[in-house]
Structures are given as C-alpha cells and as structure tokens.
Image (cartoon, rainbow, N blue to C red):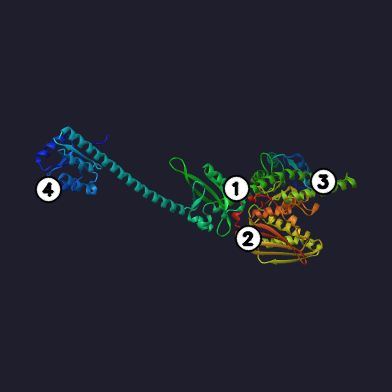
Amino acid sequence: MSDRKTVILCVDDEDNPLVLRKLVLQKAGHEVITARSGKEALDLIGSRSVDLVLSDYLMPGMNGAELAEQVKAQHPELPVVLISGVNEIPPGASIADAFVSKVEGPDALSRQISAVLERGGTAAE
Amino acid sequence: MTPHMPVNILMVDDQPGKLLSYEAILEPLGENLVKANSGREALEYLLKSDIAVVLMDVSMPDIDGFQLADMIREHPRFQKTAIIFISAVHLTDGDRIKGYERGAVDYISVPVIPELLRAKVSVFAELYRKTQQLEKLNRELEERVAERTEELRESESQFRSLANSIPQLAWMADPSGNIFWYNQRWYDYTGTTFEQVKGWGWDIVHDPEHLERVSKKYRQCISTGEPWDDTFPIRGKDGNYRWFLSRALPIHDVTGKIVRWFGTNTDITERKQAEEALIKSERFAAMGRLAGIIAHEINNPLEAISNAFYLLRDHPSLDEEARYYSRLAEEELARVAHITKQTLSFYRESQQPVAVSLSEVLDNVIELQSRRLQVSGIALEKQIETAGMVQGYPVELKQVFLNLIANAIQAMPQGGRLRIRLCHSSDWHNGRSGVRVSIFDTGVGILPEHARRIFEPFFSTKDAKGTGLGLWISKGIVQKYEGSIRFRSMRDGHGNVTCFSVFIPALAASEIPEKAAALVA
C-alpha cells in the first residue's frame, strides 16, 4: 500500500449505519466517501478516484449485487465488498470480491477490507 | 290385437259328403281345414302336425269317435286338444261325453246347425291360438331368464377376477355392514383368513388408537346409506401398519334399496409420507424466510450499535467510568450478536452443497475445544473408522458437532471421558446407508424428566449460560439432511454415560431440497 490513504466508497440507504460505518473505516485509516444509492455510487465512481466499494446488499432500487455487476462492467479492477444482515449469500453476490456479515463486527470488517485491498481487485472465483 | 295365424282343424268322418259339408260351413273361419276319412288317418295327421280342434263323427266303422278320443287323450301331447263330437243325441252318448268334461270337449247334435258348429270351432281355435301365444311367450321368457342368469354368473366371475387384479384391498358387505367377501389382496396383505375377518372381525387388523373413530363412522354410513370414506392404518402380516384411504359405496337395486356395499382400501403410505415431507420442507422454508427477515431487521441496527460502541471504546472524551459502562454495553451486545449469528444470520460460505468429510469437521471442532478439554481435565478418545463423506455445508455441519461436543464438555466440569466415534451405518428406520457420529460423555447425564424436552427451543439446563437453542438448531440441521439425532443416558455402577448419535445419509448433492437448504435452523 502506498502512503496515500485508500479511498473507500461506502454505500447504504440507511443514514445511521452509513455514518457509523464511515467513522469505523476512517478510524481504521481510510478515506471514506458515501453514497445513498447504487446510482449515486456509480456517478461518484465516474467522477473521482475510488480504491474500494463497500456496499450494503439490500437497498431499494439497485441492490448491492447489481451495483457490483455495474461497477465490474466499467472498472473490472475496482474491488467491491458486500455487507449484509441477511442469512444467505444472496444470488449474484459472488461477483463481489468479498461478502461480510454485519454480525461479525467492526474488527472483522476492517480485516476483510484490508485482505481485499492487498489481494487487489480480482473477482473471487 | 294379435295377428290371426290360421290353425289346423282336423275333420274326421267316414262319409266324404259330410266332410265336404263341414268344410263348406267352416271355410269362412279362415283356418286350415284337414280332412280324414277314418280314425287311423286322423291319428296320422295328429302325429304329423299341430291340430287345434278335432271335429269327429261318433259313429265310424273301424274306430269310432269315442275310441279315437280315448286314444288321443292317452297321448300327453294331445291331452288338451279340443274335441268336438258330432252325434245324434242319445242319452248314453251324453253320459260318455260328460266323462270328457275336464278336457276341452264339446258336442254338436245332428242335424248340424252351421252357425253353431262354426261358433264352437271358432271358440276352440281361438283358445288354441291364445294358448300357443302364451306358451311361446313363456318359452321366450324362460330363455331370457336363462340368458340373464348366465350373464350374471359371467359378470360375477368377471367382477371377482377384476377385484382380485386391482392394487387395492377390496371387500363386500351386506346391507347391515357385515363383510362377506374380501379380495385376494386383502388376505395377501393382512395375512388373515376369512373366518377371522368376516362380519365385523376386521377390527383385529386395525390400530386400537383409530378403531373407535373408524368403526363409528362406518356404522353411521351403513345406517344412513351415505358413501363411506376414511383414512386409517391397517396392519400387514409383517406386523407393520400402513396407511389406507378407504371408501365404500352402497349398491342399490331397481327400487333404490341397498343390496350390498362395495369397499376398497388404497395404500397411501407413500403419498402420506411425501405430503408430510413436503409440509416439513415447506415449514423449514417458511422458517428460513422468517429467519431471514428477522435477521435482517435485527442485524442492521446491531451492526450500527456495535460500530457506535466500537467508536466509543477509546474515545478521548470519555472518562474511566463512562468507558466502563460502554465496555459492559459492548459485551452484552456481543451476546446479542452471538445469538443472532447462531440462530438467524447463519449464512453459509458456499451456495452449493459440497463433499464434506465429517472426520475433518470433527477434528476441527475438537481443535476449537482443545483448551476447554484440557482445563476440565477430560480425556478424549477418538474412534474414526471412516472419512465420513457426506454432501452438505461444512459450516452448519460444524455447528451440529460443535453444539454436541460443547454440551458434552459442559456436562463434565469435574473431568471425565469424551469418546467420539465416526462409522459407516444405516438408518434404523429405512435402511438407507450413511454415516453415524456418536458422542459419549461421562458427565452429569440427562434427567428422565428433561429427556422429552431437550430438543425443544429455549429449553436449557445451563441456566443463564445457554441459549437453549443449540440442540434445537442441531436437530433442525440434521433433519434437513434427512438424518436423525437421538440420545441415550445410562447410569451404571461407575456413573453416567450419555450418548448423542447423529446419522446423516449419504446424499447426492441434488437430493438436498433447495428450499430446505436455504434454511438456517
């Protein structure tokens, strides 16, 4: 990793979880920008440099897997991590580089993100 | 009106002139007139053809009229043949004629009055014709009865061979419900004899638990004449009960009276099992969906709160006391996270079932528990007889054995022996082959009053320490694999031995129901 802070684009339709997740990631040393929907996220990716997308899975409109698919179509090298409170790895989520359960807690989230960043943006399997 | 079929009238006289005059008198009747010149000739005609009326002169040379009449009457075929004598009136003749009164006999005195002769002959001819028609009708009726009887006999035998060829058990009962016939399949299945099950004797192959209900409904239908149907188990000759859908229909005669009941019993054991399996898998799927919804609704705020406390953990503005409260809250939150992870958000690492080695799963679990084994002073004995390959999801299988092994360890706080055995086995119920894991401990044992409840959700003997969900979840997972989980707790001279035994069939990946696989617990 370079000296430059990694930029994480955090996507969630709910305010509180989005803000708190942003703060946790900032505390872990990342620069964080946020989007409230998949569409907003795609606009941001087009306008500025992003190192990783961390998106909630269940969102109105475009869900996390659909967002991951569009991100990968435009920027195959950009890593995408999905975070979700649902039981199952949802269909289509395998396009993302990692899938994190919300129950695992902040430390696990940070570890997963570091691992994905180190591995680089190659889609899992 | 019956068509006028001419009948034969035999006229007997030795004088041709008289015959000619009779012929002239009777001609208008339109019957066949046959002439005979002697008694002998008359007999020849009688034997050759059907004669309706014999008209004869009493005085003839060789055989006279009375002799001829006697000869005619002797022959059974002619006992009812009408005879009309033509004679001069003598007292003696009148007496003789009376002797024939029982038969159709009449006389005409000379000189013959044409109208009278015509009228008398006509009456007898008509009588003969009617009798002939009646006899013909009678014969036809008898033939039809014989034909119908044959048809019935054939249809009865066709019915029985049909009733013996159908896959159902079948029987017939009289209008009062007494069964008087069973098909061969009934005897083949139940292994009974007719003597045992005739009438109301069929109760011997019924499950006592269902008999009263079944018998009541059957009696009710017999008395009201309503078609009967019911579902109940019937014991086979091997001693096992199978489920049958049973029906009986009343058979009515033309007047609408019930003459018999015809009943069948159709084996629906497999259908019933499939339905139960479907209900079970639908229930699992519904639980899975519910768990998914709850998981989502709980896990989202849970993550936010966890993150908030994480940020508070070493926030510079907090003093020592506030940090202490925050740490307590974070610890309690960890408990919430633990339980939702165990019960609700149990997501899998792979979407397709994979080949899993239970031997590896067990090694993994034992490694996780190795410190607790050491601390409690528990001796471990492993009997691994197979790699224990099954199709499934490693994480949930790991959870099953983690629950069971953790329970065993917790049951032995003062130390003891933990024995884990993995072997090939088959299902105790259906003989399906698979893998069995048995976990023995020498711990506190299971109280008989707890035995029935230990697989219930929220049942725990560990007070605040346990969630009461471990065994319930484990059982749910094992059932999803169409396996079984059971336990025994025995007390011997040295103490207790408790064994939990898990059987998992060797399933093909495709056999794990997709919906049921989407389930958490």
Of callouts 4 and 3, the N-terminal one: 4
Residue at 63%, 60% in the rendered image: B428
Instruction: Work out how far the residue at label 2 is from the one at label 1, CA to CA, in angstroms.
Output: 31 Å
Evaluate if marks 4 and 3 touch, with contact meaning CB atoms under 8 Å apart.
no
Element under disc 3: helix
Q: Which subunit holds the residue at mark 2? A: B
Look at discs 2 and 1 and give the one toward the viewer: 1
The kind of residue tagged 1 is Arg
- Please state the horizontal and vertical placement of residue A54, each as a whole percent of the image: 72, 46
Look at discs 4 and 2 and give the one toward the viewer: 4
Of callouts 3 and 1, the N-terminal one: 1
Q: Which mark is residue B62?
A: 4
Q: Is residue A113 left or right of residue B274?
A: right
Residue tagged 1: B213
Of callouts 2 and 3, the N-terminal one: 3
**Mark 3 surroundings: few (<14), some (14-19) or many (≥20) residues within 10 A:** many
Instruction: Work out how far the residue at label 1 is from the one at label 4, CA to CA, in angstroms.
Output: 92 Å
Relative to B385, residue B344 above or below: above
Does mark 1 fall on the same chain as mark 2? Answer: yes
Residue tagged 3: B309
Element under disc 1: helix
Q: Is residue B30 left or right of residue A55?
A: left
Instruction: Work out how far the residue at label 4 is from the one at label 2, CA to CA, in angstroms.
Output: 108 Å
- Please state the horizontal and vertical placement of residue B103, each as a whole percent of the image: 24, 43
Q: Quadrant of the N terminus of chain B?
A: top left
Does mark 3 fall on the same chain as mark 4? Answer: yes
The kind of residue tagged 3 is Phe
